[in-house]
Amino acid sequence: MSLVEARGLTKIFRRPEKDPGLRGSLKHLVQRRFKDFRAVDGIDLSIEAGESVAYVGPNGAGKSTTIKLLTGILVPTAGTVRVAGAEPHTDRMVNARNIGVLFGQRTQLWWDLPVRESLALLRDMYDLSPAFYKQRLERLDEVLGLADLLPVVARKLSLGQRMRADLAAALLHQPKIVYLDEPTIGLDISVKDRVRQFLRELRQDGTTLMLTTHDLGDIEDVCERIVIIDEGRKIFDGPLAQMKDRFARVRRMHLQLAEPTPVEKLAERLPDVEVIAGDSPTEVTVTFDRFTHTAGQIIAGVLDVVEVGELHLDEPAIEDVVRKVYAGELLR
Amino acid sequence: MRPYLGLLRMSTRRILTYRLNSLILWIGGATFLAGSLAVWHALLSQGAIGGYDWDQMKAYLLVGWATASIGSAYGDWWMASRIFDGHVATDLTKPLDYQWARFSEHMGGLATEFIAIAIAATAIVTFTGGLVVPGPGQALLFAVSFLLVAPLKFTIAYITTMACFWTQNFMGVSWAKDAVVTLFSGALIPLALLPAWLAGPAAVLPFASITATPAALYLGQATGWEALRLLAVQAAWVLVLWWGARLIWRRALRALTVHGG
């Protein structure tokens, strides 16, 4: 059995339906109407030990709700979940020992006390031996630069420092599976890079990772598998490379020509693709659909007109793909 | 056990972090106690009311104020705010029993509350010329009853807090609870002075165990079997509310919505 198994996972929230204005609010007092809102709608998901999964989707797609169902915070309306054999919302305390959770937007540190105190309390909560605790702190210090943060009161940390301390808090007990809900939200580039580096090392340590993010830079180099959800439903689940193959149709070729050539001449020779002039008269960019043309055909076409010096091909960016998914372009 | 003791210590430290806030809270409470003493001193200058003379009323007001102080430093507001600002999500991913964890934090306030109570008692002895003290037997009964006030007040606050899962707001529920508790516990005036239509509900509600019971034991109004009966009722309420809270909690989790992030 997989480490994480969800079948038909569904969460329905009830939302009050109010007409606009004071009238609407008063009417709602006497005649209450509610509308069901399916935040998560029949999701099937299996995650094997050691996998690292990116869980992406537009705002309100149901990412965080799924994480909260998998961590036992929310009780599902329908469907089943098993994490390392335990049902998270009924065996909450058993499950809690297997998992580490980071909510980027909420801290689990004790706000009014030094970071060290929070970590010491977590040590007691997870029953860690003094030797293990010391060794974990050293390891986390290596990758997160924790030592400077330990004596600081949590509310006085900057956002980046807080995130590092929170990551340490989530990983202190070396959990089997780690859920990270937007771990880089609001961080500047240098801190982001540091967190990403840390995620890569975490993955190399063999930790199972599930991460939600809006920043697709978090995914590359960290996750080999991507799950895309929208309106509570899973719309893609597979290797990152496969997603690019399947959805990234557009490729871009940048060419350095031997002599200045008007783009019209090239466009005439390559009728179904887009040819755009580059920064200098000897540079052009050709954008083509890789389902209708191969890179070879494009090069051959250009060579009919002019000699080519250098060329390079843009790999499809996941941003482009996910953007299209969000815009609903890929579903049909 | 260790993590719960850890939480208790953390809670005490958190309260000590906000020394100024705690001090202001305590000055406000002390002002109320001084005011009550002054009002009753004037009222009782004509003679005893409802069986209370000035010396007994002084002791009653101190016990009432002390029982009202229990749990005030931790503040059920704090517990409630973690529910509606969503921090409950991080609490729920810890390998701790939620109710015991919150109880430990509640008990973390006791240290500062006991200090405040000791100061108030000393002040009364110093400025009003002494205080009625119970004999050793009654003192023991009172001590047991006073210790039961802490879990009793916790369960009431905890159950009230869980209303947040449905109301999404705490203000109304909290004020309603405070009003009901103050009136029916006897903290406002002794229950013996209430008219029959209020004394009736007061007798069957759990709130009398908060103030009326410890006060009756302190003043020796209840002795022997009657004293033990009151203690049994108090303990029974603690158990009923503790397990009742567990049932409500299970339902509350189904109603939990954590918005955003």
Image (tube, rainbow, N blue to C red):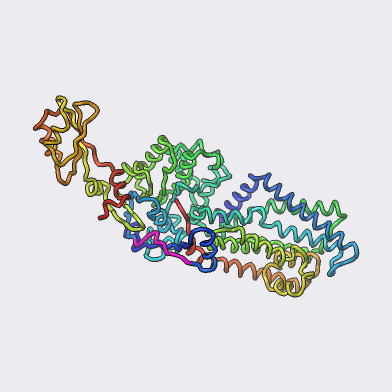
Q: Is residue B219 left or right of residue A148?
A: right
Task: Please provide percent x and percent y for residue B189.
Answer: 77, 65
The residue located at (36%, 58%) in the rendering is A232
Residue A174 seen in the current view: yes
The residue located at (49%, 56%) in the rendering is B92
Tell me if residue B87 comes above or below residue B167 in the rendering.
above
Quadrant of the rendered image containing residue A235: bottom left
Task: Please provide percent x and percent y for residue B136.
Answer: 80, 63
Task: Please provide percent x and percent y for residue B210.
Answer: 70, 64
Q: Is residue B37 left or right of residue A322?
A: right
Q: Is residue B58 left or right of residue B261?
A: right
Q: Using the image as rendered, state which of residue B182 and residue A102 is in the foreground.
A: B182
Quadrant of the rendered image containing residue B152: bottom right
Q: Using the image as rendered, state which of residue A139 and residue A15 is in the foreground.
A: A15
Q: What is the number of callouts on the image?
A: 0
Which image quadrant: the N terminus of chain A?
A: bottom left
Tell me if residue B131 comes above or below residue B222 in the rendering.
above
In this picture, which residue range is highlighted in magenta? A33-42
